Amino acid sequence: ACWASLLFILSSQPPKDIVGMTFLHADKVLHFVYFGVGGFLFMWALSCSVNLPARMRILLAILVAVAIGFIDEWHQTFTPGRHGGDFFDFAADVAGGIVGLAAAFLTYEWIKRRFTTTSGSAAPSGN
């Protein structure tokens, strides 16, 4: 919720030049990174709180990344100085979200396997 609220606030601001981000399509990198963090956070929260099969968690996280990316681009069409509806911004949003959720999913599953015994109780790492 905090991530999405910050996204709404940032998308409501006129565009600003980012210090050090002077290369072509630097905004796409920002979209990718921001949505990567969002995808990671959403998948981690989903994995920790909802007992769904892995495929359902992944599908749900992808759908959320697509929906929020679309809504963000639509929202920017109402912000003066912004050019919402940019397909490449949307593509960077979705790609970043997918990379972030994949990183969270793989990390969570690795931790779960590493620290869970076959009986389902936590086991010390031994290190």
Image (tube, rainbow, N blue to C red):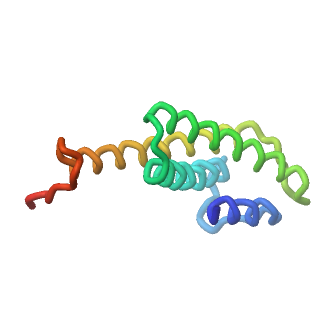
Q: Position of residue 114 (x, y in %)?
A: 21, 48
Q: Is residue 111 above or below residue 88?
A: below
- Name the residue rendered at 18%, 44% in the picture: 119
Answer with the quarter of the image where residue 92 lies: top right
Q: Quadrant of the C terminus?
A: bottom left
In the image: residue 84, left or right of residue 109: right
Q: Position of residue 83 (x, y in %)?
A: 84, 49
Q: Is residue 61 above or below residue 26?
A: above
Rendering coords of residue 120 (x, y %) = 23, 47
- Residue in the image at 47% along x and 31% along y: 55
- Residue found at the very far top of the displayed protein: 55
The N terminus sits in image quarter: bottom right
Q: Nearer the viewer, residue 58 or 95?
A: 58
Total numbered labels placed on residues in the image:
0
Residue 37 lies left or right of residue 16; in this view the side is: left
Question: What residue is at 36 percent from the left and 49 percent from the top?
Answer: 108
Picture coordinates of residue 9, whole percent (x, y): 75, 66
The residue depicted at 64 percent of the width and 51 percent of the height is 31
* Residue reaching furthest to the left: 126
Residue 48 vs residue 2, the one in the foreground = 48
In this view, the residue in front, 66 or 115, is: 115
Picture quarter containing residue 5? bottom right
86, above or below 35, in the image: above
